[in-house]
Image: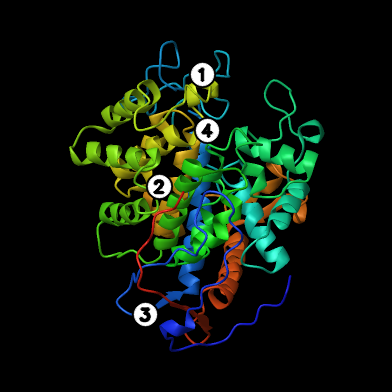
Amino acid sequence: MAPLFMFAVVVFTLSACQKPDAPDQPETGRSDPLPARQYTATTDLALSREQYRDRLYGFWLGQCIANWTGLVTEMDKIGGDGPHGAFYTREHWGQPDQPSIWDQGKPSELSATIDWVFEGEGGVWGADDDTDIEYMYQHLLLEHGVSVLTGEQIRDGWLKHIYPDENTPFVNREGEKENFLWVSNQRAHDLMRSQGLTPPATSDPQLNPDYEMIDAQLTTEIFGLFAPGRPDVALQMAYLPIRTTARENAAWVSEFYVVMHSLASVVDTSLPKKDQVMWLATWARQRLPDHSYSAKMFDFVKSRYEQGVPWERARDDVYVRYQVEQQDGYDITARKLYCNGCFASGINFASSIVSLLYGEGDFRETVKIAVLAGWDSDNPAATWGGLLGFMHGKDGIEQAFGRSFSGRFNIHRTRGNFPADGIDTFQAMSDKGVLVIDRVVQEELGGGIDLLSNQWLIPVSSDEVAPAED
């Protein structure tokens, strides 16, 4: 890793905030860096590195709790007729888990009931697709000593750390080989292996017909945390990682999540949590082009929340409007998507907004709703578990549950070729995240580190979040 020099900066001017060059963007997306808004009363944002370290710990812990709890109901309910039709409601929490679309009449191996899945202090959290690629991206940023990964660095990292189908050491419950890649991630990996392609070519709709799937939404949120209060730089850092697998609505939704995570460090903490969440979501909504089905999905769910209808009814309305009637340009029939589009970016984004708004910033309630809402339930659960885990911090999560949790993490459950046989800790992972941000603050944000106060000092521009462009 290249050496990282820290220096103290006390006063900034806006002229010190130089915008870095953006990577080539030949397809759908912005060709210029997205400006940030002045989110504080001054032009300089001061953030405690130590407090941020604790919040990064909360991000990893919150993601793991929500991810593993969500896996209990993953693909149990996707709407329509048959056993996987009628959705769960709040009354199903604590009740027997019902089989998923691929479990052939068997409930989840994780829990016989729909309930929290924890790792106690003596256990080890296993990686899953909601955490492992984010872990890999953080590792690659440090390994290469950069703030913005190139397409070649992403491809080489994927090929080094992600097993191919035929050479994976993992098997599923039926004894079949399993490399923990699905839909667009699998397509991108195949293109890297067979043709040597690099992002963004790996999400080219002509080469990757799964570019509208959910994949990028659960693998790139962490880039928002790497650029605190500066979604412009966060989106530049996330541009190629998102377009490793996604285009158009799937990419815009992923950027929505990145913006929320970037602004989570500057939200007004004196506000009630539900107002903090609404503030973040409202700002991130500006990234979605108004004509897009993702923007219309957000607006529709928000309208149902503001009308005071129960979350179950809002979720059912999402199912009817988008999966059945395919309104607002959400055409899944033409794409002939597997299981009526249940792995698609759109329907899972709409479902995630139901849990975000109705959860009102409460970690437990938000994750519960996400787990019960249906479709690919572990993914929205993990996204909001990570965001709210960051906002609450490690101690806040432990207080919410009145208990402590394991702080160990096994990346080798799903990926390979990492140090220490793949066993890491949330504390060490948070330390590494701080090192990434040290570099980003100095090299990308035009800021610095005040060593006396142990704070990042970050210049913030005064422009608003702009929507993505076609």
Q: Position of residue 467 (x, y in %)?
A: 39, 54
Q: Amino acid at mark 3?
A: Thr
Q: Which mark is residue 43?
A: 3
Kindly report which numbered mark, 4 or 2, lies closer to the viewer in this rendering. Answer: 4
Q: CA distance from mark 4 to mark 2?
A: 19 Å
Who comes first in sequence, dot 4 or dot 2? 4
Q: Position of residue 200 (x, y in %)?
A: 63, 49
Who comes first in sequence, dot 1 or dot 4? 4
Q: Which mark is residue 99?
A: 1
Kindly indicate the quadrant of the structure image that contains residue 463. bottom left
Kindly report which numbered mark, 1 or 3, lies closer to the viewer in this rendering. Answer: 3
Q: CA distance from mark 1 to mark 3?
A: 53 Å
Whether label 1 touches label 2, CB < 8 Å:
no
Where's the N terminus, which quadrant? bottom right
Q: Which residue is the site of mark 4?
A: 71
Q: CA distance from mark 2 to mark 3?
A: 38 Å
Q: Is 422 left, or right, of 200 in this rendering?
A: right
Whether label 1 touches label 4, CB < 8 Å:
no
Q: Amino acid at mark 4?
A: Leu
User: How dense is the environment of label 2, judged by Cα within 10 Å: few (below 14), some, or many (20 and up)?
Assistant: few
| SS category of the residue bearing label 2 | helix
Q: Which residue is the site of mark 2?
A: 401
